[in-house]
Amino acid sequence: MDTIAAIATPPGRGAIAIVRCSGPDARTIVARVFRSRTPLADRVATYGDILDVEGAVLDRGLALAMDAPRTVTGEDIVELHVHGSPVVARETLRALLAAGARAAGPGEFTRRAFLNGKLDLSAAEAVADVIDAESRAGARAAQANLTGGLRAAIDTVSAPLATVLEELAGAIDYPDEVPEPVRADVDGRIASCEAALAALVEDWERGRLVREGLSLAIVGPPNAGKSSLLNALLGEERAIVAATAGTTRDVIEERFFIDGVPVRILDTAGMRASDDAVEQIGIERARRALEDAAVALVVVDGSQLLDTDASAVLEATRSRPRVVLFNKSDLGHAGYAAREAPEADALHGSVLAAPTLDALRRAIAHAGWGTERVDLTRAHLASARQADAVARAREALGRARETLDVGDALDLIAPELLAALAALGEITGAVATEAILDGIFARFCIGK
Ligand SMILES: Nc1nc2c(ncn2[C@@H]2O[C@H](COP(=O)(O)OP(=O)(O)O)[C@@H](O)[C@H]2O)c(=O)[nH]1
Ligand SMILES: [Mg+2]
């Protein structure tokens, strides 16, 4: 293994920048660019001079040496903490490269951690998810995988499958001493592995929601209070609110959080029959936003009887996940009182009142991710790659059970169980090809 180096902190100016070096020669290489009165010691921060490629003092800072094998990469690591100037960080890295280090590729530190057995592959992937997390929920979910949760979940499926394989192999190798496993029993064990994988796939859907957020489109006739609602949910005057119908013409997109889950909210132009060309474009965009959104937030004026525009929006959103608000309860409730059966569970209130906003947040969560609160601490499938591997494992198990069903020789399921184990091994890294690793670490940043 060679020794790699990279700037570990983001580009730009800050209080400090960290340049990391990992590999067998980390100490030797750093000794050429760092001068201190006392020698470096394991896990002790040492103050000294950082020298540039010409040997001149570039900066003063700390060197932190961490000796193998108790380090994140499993190799000797030295970090140089310098002043957070992009120039100083770059020149420090340049000095390390001139002193014999190689510039690290994306994710190469984490890749080494995996190769040295510090992390299983699912945890290594979670490193990128922790860094990319855009919400508290996303960060907590990634933490669960980072601490080995997904690996444990996969192991609870792999272990029983491996046991079945061993039993089959024993019966084949020693047909006289070892009895063949009982068919129904094998079927039952495979079935529960299948169920566990199915549960993981369900979590994958939920995990995706946590990471990518729920898309929510506010729709309704003009003047119902859609932009007022957007502003109230965001707690700021984002969209123009006016008594004039047709004020919002383009789609406005913003983000807020419910229970730590990001919600992408789109305020749209009021939907009505209109001759105005610009307004028509806005209405068309509103239709598309509605089509793409996971949940529709339908706002109508509940203080008066619904006009045809209001009825049309209610009709158009009837068969999809939605939350309906009959707004302007402070002005009356004629429209709410006359609502039809499909809107029986609609909310009635005012976007200007806090209790209505609370009820709306709860209703959005219910429509978006169900009554069940999003479990942020459970391990989950975190990438399409992992979900694909689980799908292949499930298919193999399905084929194994078919073989059992039709009464074929029991040992014919062995190749299917092996295929399932191989697919699951791709998630933990027990089976990891260069191509798999390249695909995973390409999305990492350099220095991680
Ligand atoms: N009294 C009352 N007025 C409201 C309420 N919600 C919105 N409005 C007013 O209704 C008008 C239209 O609101 P706006 O948010 O622009 O509606 P949009 O066209 O659906 O975006 C504005 O004058 C708002 O101040 C409410 O709950 N009660
Ligand atoms: Mg508006």
Image: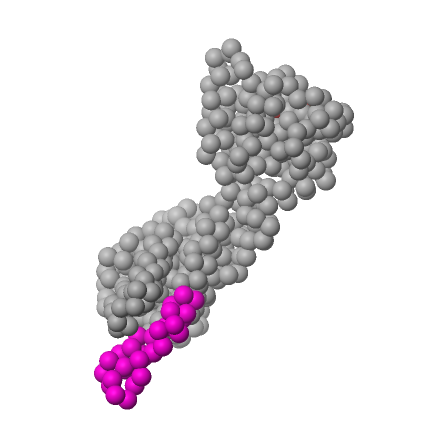
The picture places residue 119, in percent across and down from the top left corner, at 37, 67
Q: Quadrant of the C terminus?
A: bottom left
Q: Quadrant of the N terminus?
A: bottom left
Magenta range is 164-193
The picture places residue 192, in percent across and down from the top left corner, at 43, 67
List the single residue furthest toward the front.
407
395, above or below 47, in the image: above
Q: How many marks?
A: 0
Asked whether residue 414 appears in the rendered view, the answer is: no
Query: Residue 23 is drawn in which quadrant?
Result: bottom left
Q: Is residue 429 left or right of residue 130?
A: left
Asked whether residue 365 appears in the rendered view, the answer is: yes
List the single residue furthest toward the top.
275
Q: Is residue 149 magenta?
A: no
Residue at coordinates 32% horizontally, 62% vertically from top-left?
A: 402
Q: Is residue 187 magenta?
A: yes
Residue at coordinates 66% horizontally, 22% vertically from top-left?
A: 306
Residue at coordinates 54% horizontally, 15% vertically from top-left?
A: 273
Residue at coordinates 54% horizontally, 47% vertically from top-left?
A: 369
The picture places residue 322, in percent across and down from the top left corner, at 57, 37
Q: Nearer the viewer, residue 355 or 37?
A: 355
List the single residue furthest toward the bottom.
177
Q: Main secondary structure of the magenta part?
A: helix
243, above or below 141, in the image: above
Q: Nearer the viewer, residue 370 or 238?
A: 370
346, above or below 447, in the image: above
